[in-house]
Image (spheres, rainbow, N blue to C red):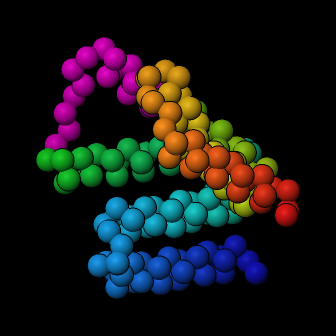
C-alpha cells in the first residue's frame, strides 16, 4: 500500500473516530475527546513526516513545522484567550526561550532527521516517552511531587514500549 493510500485510510479513521467522539459526547468528556483528537492528529503527523522526510530536508521540514505551529498558536491565543500576553518575570522568559529553542526548534529538527531513518512505528514508540521525560524533569527541576498516579502511568507507558519493541 502506498503512503498516500495509508494516509487516506488514516484520515478516514480520524474522521470516523471524530464522529464517534461527537456521538459519545455524553459518555466521554470534552477533555477525553480533545485528547483523542490530538492523538490522532499526532499519529497523522508521524506518518506524514515519515513519508515526506529525508535527512537532507530535515531543516526545511522543521522550519515549515515550526512556522505552522507558531501560526496556529497565535491564532488560538487570539481566538481562545482573547490575545497574547507577554511574560512578566525573567523565569517566564527563560521558560519560553527554552521551549522555543530546545523543545521547539531543536526537537523538530532532530525529529525530522530521525524520522527519515526510522519506521513510523518506531518513531511513535520513541516519542511516546515524551510525557515520562516531562514528568521526570518537572520532578527534578520544578519540585513537582511524584505521585502514585504518575509513577504507575509512566511505568505502564514504559512497559508498553518494551513489549512493543521486543515483539512480545
Q: Is residue 119 visible?
A: no
Residue 87 is drawn in which quadrant?
top left
Q: Is residue 42 visible?
A: yes
Q: Nearer the viewer, residue 43 or 66?
A: 43
Rendered position, 161 above or below 11: above
Q: Main secondary structure of the magenta part?
A: helix
**How many dots with numbers?**
0
Q: Nearer the viewer, residue 104 or 135?
A: 135
- Residue range in magenta is 83-103
Rendered position, 147 above or below 149: above
Furthest toward the left, the residue is 82
Query: What x and y, as percent, mark residue 162?
Result: 78, 52
Question: Does the magenta portion include 94?
Answer: yes
Query: What x and y, as percent, mark residue 130?
Result: 58, 43
Q: Nearer the viewer, residue 2 or 118?
A: 118
| Relative horizontal placement of residue 89, taking residue 41 as reference (left or right) | left
| Relative horizontal placement of residue 10, taking residue 27 as reference (left or right) | right
Q: Residue at x 27, y 52 (%)?
A: 76
User: Which quadrant is home to the N terminus?
Assistant: bottom right
Furthest toward the front, the residue is 148
Question: Does the magenta portion include 77?
Answer: no
| Relative horizontal placement of residue 82, taking residue 99 as reference (left or right) | left
Query: What x and y, as percent, mark residue 110?
Result: 66, 38
Q: Residue at x 72, y 61 (%)?
A: 121
Q: Residue at x 50, y 27 (%)?
A: 139
User: Which quadrant is home to the C terminus?
Assistant: bottom right
Query: What x and y, as percent, mark residue 20?
Result: 42, 83
| Relative horizontal placement of residue 94, taking residue 47 as reference (left or right) | left
Q: Residue at x 70, y 56 (%)?
A: 160
Amino acid at each position: 500500500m502506498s503512503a498516500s493510500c495509508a494516509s487516506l485510510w488514516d484520515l478516514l479513521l480520524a474522521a470516523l473516530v471524530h464522529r464517534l467522539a461527537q456521538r459519545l459526547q455524553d459518555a466521554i468528556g470534552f477533555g477525553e475527546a480533545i485528547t483523542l483528537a490530538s492523538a490522532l492528529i499526532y499519529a497523522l503527523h508521524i506518518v506524514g513526516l515519515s513519508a515526506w522526510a529525508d535527512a537532507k530536508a530535515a531543516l526545511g521540514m522543521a522550519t515549515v513545522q515550526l512556522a505552522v505551529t507558531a501560526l496556529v498558536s497565535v491564532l488560538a491565543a487570539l481566538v481562545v484567550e482573547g490575545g497574547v500576553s507577554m511574560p512578566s518575570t525573567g523565569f517566564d522568559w527563560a521558560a519560553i526561550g527554552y521551549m522555543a529553542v530546545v523543545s521547539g526548534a531543536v526537537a523538530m529538527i532532530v525529529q525530522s532527521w530521525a524520522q527519515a531513518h526510522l519506521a513510523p512505528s518506531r518513531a511513535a514508540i520513541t516519542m511516546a516517552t515524551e510525557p515520562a521525560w516531562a514528568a521526570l524533569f518537572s520532578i527534578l527541576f520544578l519540585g513537582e511531587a511524584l505521585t502514585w498516579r504518575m509513577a504507575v502511568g509512566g511505568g505502564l507507558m514504559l512497559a508498553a514500549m518494551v513489549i512493543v519493541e521486543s515483539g512480545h
